[in-house]
Amino acid sequence: MTAVVEMRDITMAFGTNQVLKGIDLDLEPGKVTALLGANGAGKSTLIKVLSGVHNNYGGTVLIDGAAVHLDHPTTAQSYGIEAVHQKIADGVVPGLSVAENFLFEDIVNNRISRTASMRSILPRSKEVASILSLDWPDDVMRSDIFELPIADQQLLLLARSLVHEPRLLILDEPTSALSDSEAQRLFTVIRRLRDEGVAILYVSHRLQEIDAIGDRLIVLRDGVIRSDHPQPFDWADALHQMLGEAEATSDDDRGEQRGTDDVLCLSGVQLLDESVPFDISFRSGEVAGVFGLLGSGGSELALGMFGADPFVGGEMTLNRKPFAPKAPADAIAQDVYMVPEDRVAGTIIKNWSIAHTSTFPFLRDVSRFAVMNWRAEDKVGSSVIDEFDVVAQSPHDPVISLSGGNQQKVVVGRWLRMNPTVMILNEPFQGVDVGARRDLANKAREVAAAGSAVIVMSTDLGEIMQVSDRVIVLADGDLRHDAYLSETSREEILSKLTEVE
Amino acid sequence: MSKNEQATDAQLPEAKHHIDFRNLVVRYGFIAVTVFFFVFFYATIPAFRLSTTMLSMLKFTSVVAIAGLGVTITMVVGGLDLSVGSIAGMSVTVAAMTMVIYGQQGSVAIVAVLIAGALIGAFNAFLIVILKIPDLLATLATMFLVQGLKLIPVEGQSVSSGLILRDGSVAPGKFTEGFLQINRGTIGAVSYPVIIFAVLTLATWFFLSRTKWGRIMYAIGSNPEAARLAGARVGRYKALAYMISGVFAAIAGLILSSRIGQGDISAGSSLLLDAVAVALVGTSVLGANKPNALGTALGAILIGILLTGTTMMNFPFYWQDVVKGLVLLVALILSYTLSDKKQRHVEAVPT
């Protein structure tokens, strides 16, 4: 079968950062090609090249064997390439009715008057809806778009992109906002389109979904296609290719620390709306690594234990006493600390110095009757710089002037230096260079050795295996695996990810 | 300003090499403009040179400045209090009712006004923190409510001594001499309103830049989520800010009331815009690019100088708003167009 779209040696760089390093991929009609890759593998960049968003890519795209240049989204559309992006809210137009949303493109292009009556546009909007056999009654078509269930909004966007009878349909994480049953509805539609001969490029982090809907699986890592699998997929190999080799660490001979005291105990904790409640205990004196792909519930676990965002359900005890923090301040008062996933949005205060940032959670220690003692504050800033090897001139340097790794050392260091009872680090190595990553991992291990319960969340198995004594695997909010590193293996951990109870 | 504060506001290391003209303008432009006009008026208007001119300028500026300090605190936590004008206006009516209709002492009136201001601040906090209404909209609603509600007990009338009450009797009280002293009294040559203005400016400055509470408030205004995740009780600090703002507006209202000497129902109607303007102007002083107490006070004084000067040069009254508008515009250009602090933040965001 001849491919609809052929990519030949596609490259794409942002400054010095080479994101796509020569992609060769044929997309065939009547096939769902699933694309899998960790964060930063280059998936979104590849999609954007195909949908005409990045016009300065290298290499050639052939459509029906003829070379074309995709320099604009409308060019891509004219060649029959349609993309439905991840965020539904970016696609639907608030303030318009369902019917108007179906016809939004016509309205923008003035093919339909902005003031056209609902009655006059209903027939045409129903035509668009009928592409997906969406037989919605008139009152639904007349209602505001936000009264429509989220899954139906997703179907509406899909129908709208099918008006031009695309030859290649790109779906980027289309189920991320959908429940299981809603996703099933979407799959029925995708299978139908496939059988009608549309080429589909399906991007997702949900392995079960890919297994169910994909005809072919492409694994992308660091801008290169690592493997290409036909059905049935060899998941062990695919995950291995996606996540990379275990990184050779300089401290492979580090001893395993096993904790003895259960410090923070969770019982019946439910992370996601449709996930299974579980019990787990975190122990002092060890680093527990929580591994899971995007959307597996790791962030929910971190935020719940810190009182920042309540669990769907469940209870906790801290040192055998009930622990129910209603706000981060309550958790901090009991020496339970967390470094959030998103450093810029979650920790950085614009224009603040290293000293200000370091002392912020513990201002009581650097003030007397609430009056700030700036000398004491500078001392704390200097000690964070010294203890965590932050590359900076002085504690007065603005944190945002530091590199990502040094910023992270400051925002992790400000908590680690306070002898936490429980220290939660959510994705502490994101945007952090290798050297800083090793320093931070060593510090986390030191703090655990000194008696803290340290919990590290990551979507990168290499990082987890580098820093942890114990590995906990989450998938779709469920607890899949919990074992000491010496008693499990990379293969076992990966097999737990794809396992379906 | 201490070593520490300067360091926070200093340029990034890589930018240090070219401290350019633009930077000088952003940092000292506002002060230069103030000094320029002061010298200009001093040189051209003989009456401007009298020390009494300066003191009376400061005196009439104090009301706007004090209300502006309250607005400044709400701006620090990332909000904006639009109800300060109507709180000050209500204070005038409450003071008049307490003394004229209920025949109470001036001290009782003062306490009543301050409590009323704090309560309205608490109501704003309730709308914003508990009911989650955006700051601007919540305080806009409060503004209308307070403006209207204050007229109900006085049936839409201004309250002055000799007022005929509904039962036909004459209101028993009057503005007490003590209460009128708030505006008239002096220590040496300096009148009480100027002293209150100076004390509140220093107190607000100390609170915002020297205490941990001020530190936390700035953090909340800059990145509320980061503040929350570092353990700040965001709601409580926002509530505190709006209550302080309410009390400051009430103090401004007390001075206004003592100046007018009767419960004028239209008092304070122009105060809101002036107070917000001086707080906004204050953000550009010394290139701070954040709301701050000294900036607000200086902003109020600059506008005071300009109004005094232009009035003395016989500009018609309607030039006053043009002057205020121009000052605000210059300040906004300093903060938004010329300052590189915003840019810097975006550049530093790692990708």
Image (tube, grey):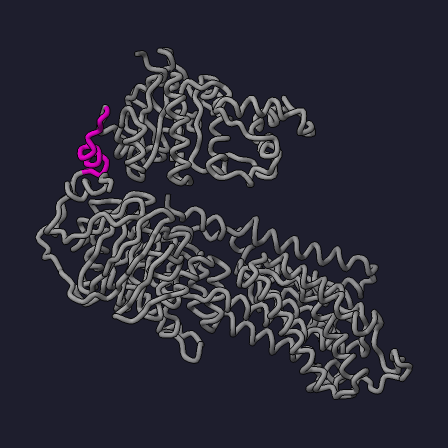
The residue shown at (63%, 21%) is: A111
The residue shown at (33%, 53%) is: A270
Q: Is residue B134 visible?
A: yes
Residue A261 vertical position relative to residue A233 in the rendered view, above or below: below
The residue shown at (68%, 65%) is: B38
Residue A114 vertical position relative to residue B180 in the rendered view, above or below: above
Dominant secondary-structure state across the stretch colored magenta: helix
The number of callouts visible is: 0
Looking at the image, residue B194 sits to the left or right of residue A281; the answer is: right
- The magenta stretch is A231-244
Q: Quadrant of residue A173?
A: top left
Nearest the eye: B32 or B76: B76
Q: Position of residue B70 (x, y in %)?
A: 61, 69
Nearest the eye: A493 or A62: A493
Residue farthest to the left, as pictured = A253
Nearest the eye: B240 or A88: A88
Q: Position of residue A167 (x, y in %)?
A: 41, 18
Q: Position of residue A79 (x, y in %)?
A: 45, 17
Q: Quadrant of residue B126?
A: bottom right
The residue shown at (20%, 45%) is: A462
Residue B348 vertical position relative to residue B176 in the rendered view, above or below: above
Q: Is residue B40 visible?
A: no
Looking at the image, residue B237 sits to the left or right of residue B303; the answer is: left
Looking at the image, residue A65 sits to the left or right of residue B216; the answer is: left
Q: Is residue A41 magenta?
A: no
Q: Position of residue B243 (x, y in %)?
A: 59, 71
